[in-house]
Amino acid sequence: MNRKKAVVAVIFMLTMSLSGCLRNGGNGDGEGGVTYEPGPYEVLKYEDIVYASGLGYAQSNTETSAVPLMLDVYCPDNNSTDRPVLMFIHGGGFTGGVKHKPEIVEMGNYYASQGWVYVSIDYRTTEELGDIDGMSEQEIIDYYDGIAPEEWVEHTFTGAESTKQIQQSIAMYAAQRDAKAALRWIVANADTYNISTDEIAVGGASAGSITTIALGISDLGDFRDEISIEQDPTLATTNLNETYDVKSMVYFWGSKVKLDVFEAVYGFDRYDVDDPELFMAHGDGKDPVTPYEGALALQDIYDSLNVHSELVTLEGHGHGAWNAVVDGKGLFELTFDFLMERISERNSGNTTDGDFGN
């Protein structure tokens, strides 16, 4: 199949005033640890910042082009430096979804009002990855060259029952690559937003939670090094020289399916005692999308490794239980309490081997 990769370099300069978010020129390198100051604070929001680009078929179904990838940053209006950060990944079954979903915006406002930096990201879904209806397997492999590795695409043929499932599997890989690029952007811009790279947490809901688990547990080069810059020139926009250290993960009604696929394709089991600590909220009601048993399986893995995890069962709830309340607390407060408790434990030195990730 003949196709031309028209790659547009995405260069972004933040020209807006960051007077509230950046006041004292914090070093953002985490050398002094986190300097959290409890709120509440006014929230400053910076929207639609381009953090990288990725190949897609957003403009044409026959030629790839660079798809701009955007994020929103929520900051507390205070003088703190070295703030903890939570990057959140929306759901949508890898077929859609947006970073400004009302619940995600509400969560961002909550965290920033409490002194955190909160980053909500968009990523490539099937909406940007073209239409493969009527194509042969080889044509599909060629079509997704530079978007997903050939071995990943080939694996999708073994279990996929429809074109939609093939497209979702390809989008799973692309979403992971994009989320890792967003984390590297956060590290590269830590100084600008007074972020402590010592206290990075990632979270997500549904498909975003699936991406979160793979983000925290996979190696730095996974979902990145399987494709070369020659295949995907947009990799050059993704701060490839930066590294990150995820300390905590927040999981809302997700699963470990992406890591299962990664192991099936490449043969690597990435779980180990250095994995980030994990907070899970999952309903035990009917959930045909991501069953409750997936959370129990993750908890068993963490228990076997003696890595800290907490599973909050949302009794009677199914998928997408944003309004669930447990012991008088909503999800935002429950996750915030968990993350602050873990920061306090790390700062006090009251940890044991295997308690904390990376």
Image (cartoon, grey):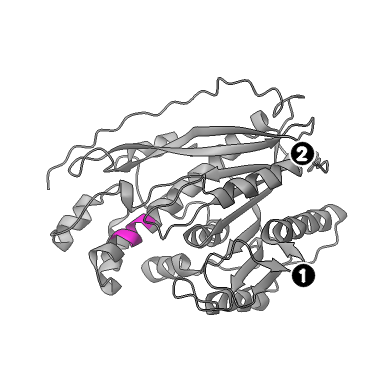
Could you say which is closer to the camera, residue 60 or residue 145? 60
| Residue assigned mark 2 | 31
Element under disc 1: loop
For residue 181, side relative to residue 356 (left or right): left
Element under disc 2: loop
Q: Residue at x 56, y 56 (%)?
A: 204
Mark 2 closeness class: few <14, some 14–19, many ≥20 residues within 10 Å: few
| Residue assigned mark 1 | 327
Could you say which is closer to the camera, residue 68 or residue 303? 68
Residue 207's x, y, as percent?
A: 47, 60
Residue 257's x, y, as percent?
A: 45, 69
Relative to 100, residue 13 above or below: above
* Residue type at numbered disc 2: Glu
Relative to 124, residue 15 above or below: above
Residue 218's x, y, as percent?
A: 52, 59
Magenta span dominant secondary structure: helix
Res 67 seen here: yes
Displayed quadrant of residue 311: bottom right
Res 267 seen here: no
In the image, the segment drawn in magenta is 167-171
For residue 189, side relative to residue 12 (left or right): right
Relative to 312, residue 225 above or below: above
